[in-house]
Image: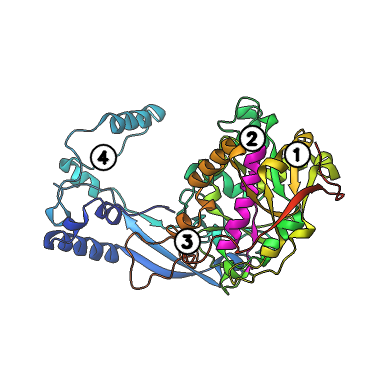
Amino acid sequence: MASGYMLFPKAWFCLPEARRQEAYWQSVRATGEQHMRQVWRDEQIPVPDSWQIMTNGRTTELRSLQLRMPNSRGWPTELGGQWYPTERGPYSTDFLQQLMDDAPDLPIWLDPENSSNAAAADRVPPETFAFMPDWLGLGYWLRGRKGYWDPNMTGNIAQQVIEHTHYIDTHANTAMAKRVVPMSLHRYNWDLPRQANGNQPYFACQGFGADCSKLKVLAFSPSVEKLLASSASWHEFTFLLQGLAALATALGRAVAWPSLPCNTAWVSRGRSVERPPLRLGGMWLPWSSPEGDLMCTPWPYVNDECLSRGRGMLPWEHNHMHSQQHSEADSDSSIIHAEHERHAEEDHVKEGHFALASQVVAINATSEVDTLQPMQDRAILLLDSFVHVVFSEATSLQKQAYNRFWQECTVLDTAAYTAIFDHDGNRVPSIPTAFSTKPMADLGLSHRPARLRRGRLHRHDHSLIKP
C-alpha cells in the first residue's frame, strides 16, 4: 500500500506557467499522463460488513499498479530528459549511507540513475502497489473538517483508520493548526506541553513571559455566548468580538475567543450540519461540544497575532483553564454585567445586519475600567453582556494597544476578512473567476449599529462596581 503522489504530476508544477504552455512541454505532459493511465488499474473490491460505514458501500475502489525496479536508461527525452544532477548532493549521499549502515547485510538497490544497471533492473520481479483509499488514510482538510473524524457526528463509529494534519488550506498558522485539530477533537494531551515547556500550555503563553500562571482572561459568559447564534451577519459578529477584545485589552487580559453554533443562519447558509460530509466554508473549524452541539470556530483565530503574547485563547484552551480555575470562575464576584443607564433609553433603530444591537451597552473605558481593579486578582472574568468600549484620550495607551490588536488580528477587521473569504466562507481566489461568489461582507454597510445606549458595569448581583 502506498500513500503520496506520482512524481511526474507534482514535478510538472515546478515549471513556470509560461513554460508549461509551450508545445514541447504540453507534449511531454500528454505523454506522461498517457503512460500513467496505462500502468494503473482501478477496480471495485468487496469489503466486510463491518467496514461499510467507512467505505460508504459494499465495495471500495482500489487503484493499483505494478512497479518495476526503475532505471533511467539514459533519461528518455520524451519524458523530459535528465531530471537530476550528475553528482549526488550531501543529503542524498548521507541518506543512502545511513540505509547501508542500518542494514549492512542487505544489498542496496541498483542505482536507478546508472543506465548500465538497466538489464539487471529488468530481472528484478515487479511488485504491485495500491494507493490508500480516502477512508483508510487521508488528511484533515479533505476528510476531517467534513465531520468524518468527529465521533459525535458519526455515532462513535470509526470513519477512517489513519489521519494526519499535514495540509490545512485556510488563513491560519499551519504549525499551530496541527495542534488545534486534536484539541477540537478532544484528543489533546494537555500534560505534554507542560512537560515540554513548563507552565506554558497555551498559545497565549508564547512571548507572554516565563510564568504563564499569571495569565488572566476575559470571556463571554456561557449565556451570552449562546446569544451569538442570533447574530445576523459577519458584520455583527465582528462588532461583538471587538467589544470583548477592547475590554480585555483595557484590562490587560487575554480574550477567550468565542464560537458559534454551525447552524447559525449566516454560517451554514442553508447547508446541512446534521451529518458528514459537512460542506461549511474553509474559514470554519467545526467541532462538537461536550453537550453534543456542533460548533464553528473561525480558523483565523489560529494565528500568532490573535493568540500569542497574552492576546487570546482558543475555546479548548479556555475550557481547560476554566476547569483548572473551576471554583473561582463560578463565583459571582468573577462575573461582570453591563446595564443601560435609565436616562439612555431610546427607540432602537433596526438594521438588517445587526440583530443584537439593542443588547449592546456602550461603556467609557476611563470611568469603567478602573472600577474593575478589585476584581483583577481573578484569573477568569466572565462578561455577562455585550459591550462597546469607548476609549478617550485619558486612556490613549490602552487605545493604542487595542488599535495594534485590531490591525494585526484580522478576525477583528471586517474589511481585511472580506479580502480573504467569500460569502460562503471559502478562500477568495487570487485571480477572480466567473464562478467567484460575492464577498463575505458588504463593506458598504456600517460596521457598528447606528445607535448604542450608554451604560455602566455591575457585579453579577447587580450592585454597581465601585473602587
Name above or below for residue 215 compared with residue 49: above
Cα separation, mark 3 vs mark 4, equals 30 Å
Give x and y (percent) for residue 160.
Answer: 57, 58
Image disc number at residue 201: 2
Observer able to see residue 12? yes
Task: Identify which residue, 6 or 220, lies in the foreground.
Answer: 220
Q: Earlier in the sequence, mark 3 or mark 2?
A: 3
Position of 125 with respect to 146 (left or right) is left
Horizontal side of 359 relative to 328 (left or right) equals left
Q: Residues within 10 Å of mark 2 (few under 14, many from 20)?
A: many
* SS for callout 4: loop
Q: Which mark identifies residue 372?
A: 1
Is 4 in the magenta? no
From the viewer's perspective, is 384 left or right of 22? right
Give the mark toward the camera: 1 or 2: 1
Look at the numbered disc 1 and give the secondary structure of its residue: helix
Q: Are marks 1 and 3 in contact (CB under 8 Å)?
A: no
Q: Which mark is residue 110?
A: 4
Q: Which residues are magenta?
A: 235-264
Tag 2's secondary structure? Answer: loop
How would you rate the neighbour count of disc 3 (Cα within 10 Å): few for under 14, some for 14-19, many for 20 or more? some
Q: Amino acid at mark 1?
A: Leu
Mark 1 Cα-neighbour bin, 10 Å: few <14, some 14–19, many ≥20: some
Q: Is residue 92 above or below residue 443?
A: above
**As drawn, 110 above or below 416:** above
Q: Which mark is residue 133?
A: 3
In the rendered image, the quadrant that contains the C terminus is: top right
Q: Give above or below for 10 relative to 209.
A: below
Is residue 257 visible in the rendered image? The answer is no
Tell me the element at label 3.
loop
Looking at the image, tell me whether mark 4 or mark 2 is earlier in sequence order: 4
